[in-house]
Image (cartoon, coloured by chain):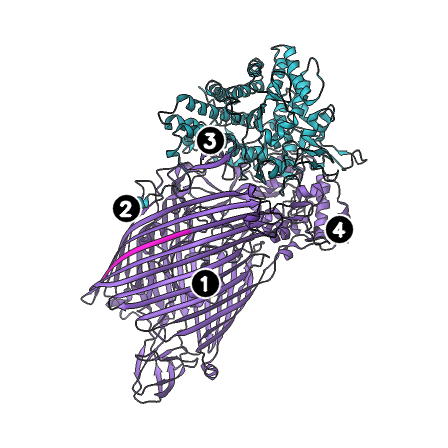
Amino acid sequence: CSKEFLDRPPEDSPNSEEFYKTTEQIEVATNILYSVPWYNFISNVSWCIGDLAGGTGRTWDPRNQDFDLFAITGEHNTLGQAWGSLYAVVAHANTIINTIPTTANPDVPQSVINNAVGEARAMRATAYFYLVRIFGSVPIVENNLELVDESYIPRHLVEDVYTFIENDLNFAIDNITNTKSSDPGRISSNGAKALLAKVHLTQEEYAQAYQLATEVIGSGEFKLLGGTGADGTTGSYNDLFLTQNDNNSESIIATQWTGSGNYAEGNGVQSLYALSGITGFDDGWSAIGPSLDLQDTYEDKEMDQRYKATIMDPESFYPDLNGGYTAPGPSGCNAQGTNVAIKKYVVGTPANNGGGARSSYANNIYLLRYADILLIQAEAIILGNVGSMAEAETAVNKIRNRAGLPSITNPTFEDVFRERKIEFAMEMEHWYDAIRRSDALAYLATIQRGWFNDTERGATSGITDRFVTVTADKLLFPYPTNETLNNPALLDPPVPYFN
Amino acid sequence: QKQVSGTIMDSNNIGIPGANIIEKGTLNGVVSDFEGNFSIKVGGNAILVISYIGFETREIAIDGRANINVTLEEDLSQLDEVVVIGYGTQLKEELSGSVANIEVGSIDKIPQVSIDQLIQGRAAGVTVTQNSGRPGGAVSVRIRGVGSINASAEPLYIVDGVPISGDSRNTGGSGRFFENSSGNLAGLNPNDIETVNILKDASATAIYGSRGANGVVIITTKKGRKERGTVNYSGYTAIQQPTNIMPVLDLQGYAGLQNEMREVFQLPEQVEFLRPGLLGKGTNWQKEIFDDALLQNHQLSFSGGNEKTQYYLSTGYTDQQGTVKGSGFDRTSIRLNLDSQILDKVKVGINLTASRTNENIVANGDSRGIVALALRNNPAVAVFNADGSYAGPVTAEEIALAVPNPIAQLENTDNDLRKDQLLGNVYAEIDILKNFKLRNEFGGSFGYNKNTLFQKAFAYGAISFDNPTLTKTNEDFDYWIVKNLLTYSNNFGGKHDLTVLVGHEAQQSSYNGIVTTGSGFVDNSNPTLNNADADTYIIDEYKGSNSLESYFSRLIYSFDSKYSLTASIRADGSSRFAEGNKWGYFPSVSAAWRLSNEKFMEDFTAIQNIKFFGGYGEVGNQEISNNPFLSILNTNATQLGTAFSVSNIPNPDVRWETSKQTNLGVDFSLFGGHLNATVEVYRKVNSDFLFQLGLNDFVLGGDSSIAGSITPPWVNLGEMENKGIDVTLNFDTLSAGAFSWNSTLTFSHYKNEVLELVDGLTINGQTDLDDTNQILTETKVGEPIGVFYGYQVEGLFRSMDDLNNAPVQFGQPVGDASAVGRTWLGDIKFKDVNGDGVVDGEDRTVIGSPHPDFTFGWQNNFSYKGFDLSIFVQGSYGNEIFNALNRSLTGTNLTYRNQLESVRDFWTFQNPDATHPRYTSNATPNIFISDRYIEDGSYIRIQNVRLGYQIPSKVLDKIGGLNKVNIYGSVQNLYTFTNYSGYDPEVGAYNQNPLLAGVDNGRYPLPRTFTFGIDIDF
């Protein structure tokens, strides 16, 4: 036989030796960072942490209830998916960061390479930002291939993880050339800056947070959907969560799902949030319901448009859902004993959303949106004594007015916190707000995690209370046990990453 | 023409039944009846040729006589016994490698639909476990221990010269396989098989080079004989019954359990359970999913030939229903085997079979399988509501917690797999020069698989699925092989025999599959894709190929029937490895000394037929995925356009796995040939064994269940050793008279040990149990592969003193029953194995081994006159089972799950001596992987009992037209002696994964089968 007989390259996919060369190939290289690797985290875990542990949602489902009850161990498969999925984002970002600068053809402009690397570093920072808030000290992985032969890989100091995130975002700010108008689905330079503001806020570095948030607001690149003034545009809060409005002007960082119906190319959130009968499939498990605590947070459920856009009352009517949808009566519209169900991120059947399949829907999930930046600015002003109270008032009222609520004056930290809780309810966010509080343990202990005993509202059987005492060690989640077994170094004290 | 009659007798004057009496030079012949009598019409000067297996053939001239009595002398040496070896045959006495020969005659009337199922217990050193009782189910075959981990550990099968991989996971192909489907040999009709030879050691398998590391099973199908045409019909009908049911709670017990749990968990009472005594038995879900099932098999064959041409034609049909409702397998096959001496120096032939199998697949083997669902399901729920709809959960709490209705699931999931296969080999053999023979073969296997998975719209209780979804997989594969073999054989001076083979071989395997999914059907009535909503189509395609080119040579030399020497070498080039690592070289040498033929042994008669043999060889393994040295990109759709991402970490250095094997053996006979024994010892060392490295999730981006995770690299990980002993004892009364008894005992022992793993790695075997990924086994240096790994249990906490003085368990403070995350009385007390004062992940240790101390098979054949009785007993000793099903059925941490009856004896203050821990909620450490779930898996099984009767020829003569009629009845899987508490101790390895051997996770249990059959020669 000839030599070629034993030469059998792959016939159904390209290989990395022949890719990442041309401008076109490099421009699409980062697409993966907005999609598949996020799937398990977004669909299965993010809401368990953000809303179940956070207390804005509740459940009876025994696996997910462990988040509600702080009974998570390293054996918990759902939590393990957060670890794996976020590191999958890191791995694919690393491939781009480490490969493209050396494989690109000489005729590819440096700005194209830097833009792609900038996007990848911004996405890597996004993943590490979740990792450090969920797990605390974690291993910083910059080159996965170098670790293949290592059996002892240490974890790194929390402050070094934050420094690593900041370095990535600063590179992204300096090098990304995409803009909201040129590439509405991709991270822009100002988008990276917005995330950096949040990273600083989380570290209580209020001056930097204020400075960066103010720059982003001043840039005019993002606009509040339904807001007024220079940074507002037509639409409404409810419009934020329609598939057709993916990558709207308020979206800063969002996963980019499709309606292909393939596993992990769409998001699975609707399957878990929706009541059965809405999605067109046998999902619609209403695995989580809006907690009694959240329901009590609204000042006015009629006036605040965010209520109906977030929470589905029995017999309520949604003209935008499946061409007109009326929720079932009290017995059918009762997710996890809450006497209501979730509306946010519930978008209906594939036919009404340009495709999709069970556990794979086309609507994007926000990782960061402009409303967050306004509230970051306000919080930084209030807690950091920077800027002016007038700016904080403007920012908070933009959020309140867009929702249909009247303005307030001299907002306090609690005012901003309440707005965040309502604004981002079911957006997998509240846990991170709760643990940022200086009195996080006391706050978490006040959350009503119980359920209604009866679907008839106000029935005599009332509420079964459940309050959970949270200890300081529960503010971080444990590493997956399989990981500590494979790499016991995770149990050793963290080491510095930067010398 | 005249009638000649007489009797054929042995030296004890006992009649020999079944002896062949043929008129020399013609096709005229008869067979003696069971008293040894015969009667034949022959010409006056005819010569009769009288033969019978185990006796010397005699030729008798009639000389006008009408009555002839013939005495046959026993032929103890059976010198002419020929054994099939790779690329040829060899006289058994000259054999120096380890080859086990299975007599198909003893197994071909056992109701198993696949040949790999039939070789269980028949050959020493060959461990066969049925992984499942599903129809046509694949088995795990381990020849002399476990040689590899990720690369397939299954042997290579050679069917009439065409290689077929035993790896049903398809690791070396597209990597895709149909879960819970039949094995790769299920298309082959066992009735067509003549012999099965198993090459066990490297001196025998080295001629197969890179594919011989796990042993080679050579299957030869029936050929026509140089005799008049025969028409044979054989058929059987069988009833298969589920063997036993597990003692889960009935409704009264379940209601009591729920009441107790709800009290402990502080949940509101369930009103309907307030008076359990008033309730009935409820639904017995096991009875609902299991049922008696029919198995039938029919085969018609035609064979015969003359001096120049012989033929064998057959057609067969097998239909096996499964004991789990909805499962089934059927096969239709045809075969043509033809050999013809077309010219003086040219012989040609073909072996060709075409088959179609159809399977109805029912998911089993994991926590979501039908058997596991049935066991856990709530007996308070009916199968159907009064209106005929499926019953199921109704309230929000039930919906969140309840187990799906298994009957609704299986009746609304149509998973049909059709496999069409054409397997064949054409050869031409030319005597080109004196002593030189050239043989060319072209063979292949060409197949087409069609899988239709239709999930119908259905509802049970308040849960509804109203979007029927159809997934169709169409997959074709082509495999071809071309062989050119040149053989030189000569005899020098009457004493020196020399045979030299040189050969070249090229083979290629390619596959291409398309998977299309559509949903949005209006209803369940027309499950074809054109009726789906066109917007929902999802299409996937996969394609690839691999190739192997080989050069090989073998020399067999024997001297004076005393000494023989075999040496072989093979060079294989494989497309699976990068340039520079493509070629591997596999040498072997072996020798035999036939001590009994030495002059000085002439007077030594206590032991006969003594032969010592031994050898050394190296073989390879390359059954890994294609292109492990390249980083392949995945493509995905995103809203930004197509995304490209690396799918795997490449390793350009990956190379052949090599197995170095040493074998020493002895054959001998005692008591005048009544007892024959073979004893062999061996050592196999697999170096550089191929493994897909298990890396940390933070390096790979999660395990394979995480979307976007990167596949770890294939590496040459380490070294593994298997040492063992194979013993085969055969006893035969050797009487050709009315009564005979033949008994064969095979005994196999192996010891597996991992000698080296690079970087001191530990390999974890993990799988989903109750929807959570759990590490069940570990593999590390100094231990056997895949030993069970977990915590040791010391008992229950029964006193406050014990609780307060014990090491802290998993960081949980001592608390009380009212809070989660506390250790309390009635919890499992885990052992602080490393003595560091706390119980945590570091305290996991080896808690059991799935490897048996020994396995055995004992076949007995008795015959008396026309009756024959065979009893086959088979078993395993010393292996342990991880009873994952038991873990699920004794968890007592979730409401709405049925449990075993034994859990009701649970710890409370009132029941301090309980056997079962307290009830506690979901995240309890009580269910951590521990030796609580390890059970002894030893068993002895009466695998088959068969009674047959051959209708006397006198009777047949009266009917006319019939040559031979056998009727028989048999019972398969008659009874199993075991202490194992699950369905069946023969657990096997889930999906043939050696890291998950002995894990019982709701597998499809083996049925008991009652068979009636008939076998007729016309």
When the figure is inspected, residue B755 is found, relative to residue A396, above or below; the finding is: below
- Residues at marks 4 and 1, CA–CA distance in whole angstroms: 56 Å
**Could you confirm whether marks 2 and 1 are on the same chain?**
no
Q: Alpha-carbon neighbours of circle 1 within 10 Å: few (<14), some, or many (≥20)?
A: many
Q: Which residue is mark 3?
A: A91
Write the residue at 32% across / 76% down: B56
When the figure is inspected, residue B101 is found, relative to residue B226, above or below; the finding is: above
Q: Alpha-carbon neighbours of circle 4 within 10 Å: few (<14), some, or many (≥20)?
A: some
Q: Alpha-carbon neighbours of circle 2 within 10 Å: few (<14), some, or many (≥20)?
A: few
Q: Amino acid at mark 3?
A: Ala
Q: Does any portion of residue B444 appear in the rendered image?
A: yes
Q: On the rendered structure, is B17 left or right of B473?
A: left
Closer to the camera in the image, B682 or B332: B332
The circle on residue B276 is 4
Please identify which colour was used for chain B in the image: purple
The tally of labels here is 4
Magenta region: which residues?
Answer: B477-488
- Residues at marks 3 and 1, CA–CA distance in whole angstroms: 50 Å
Q: Nearer the viewer, mark 3 or mark 4?
A: 3
* Quadrant housing the N terminus of chain B: bottom left
**Circle 4/circle 2 CB separation < 8 Å:** no
**Circle 4/circle 1 CB separation < 8 Å:** no
Please identify which colour was used for chain A in the image: cyan
Closer to the camera in the image, B37 or A374: A374
Q: Chain of mark 1?
A: B
Q: Which residue is mark 2?
A: A2
- Residues at marks 2 and 1, CA–CA distance in whole angstroms: 37 Å
Q: Amino acid at mark 1?
A: Ser
When the figure is inspected, residue B709 is found, relative to residue A419, above or below; the finding is: below
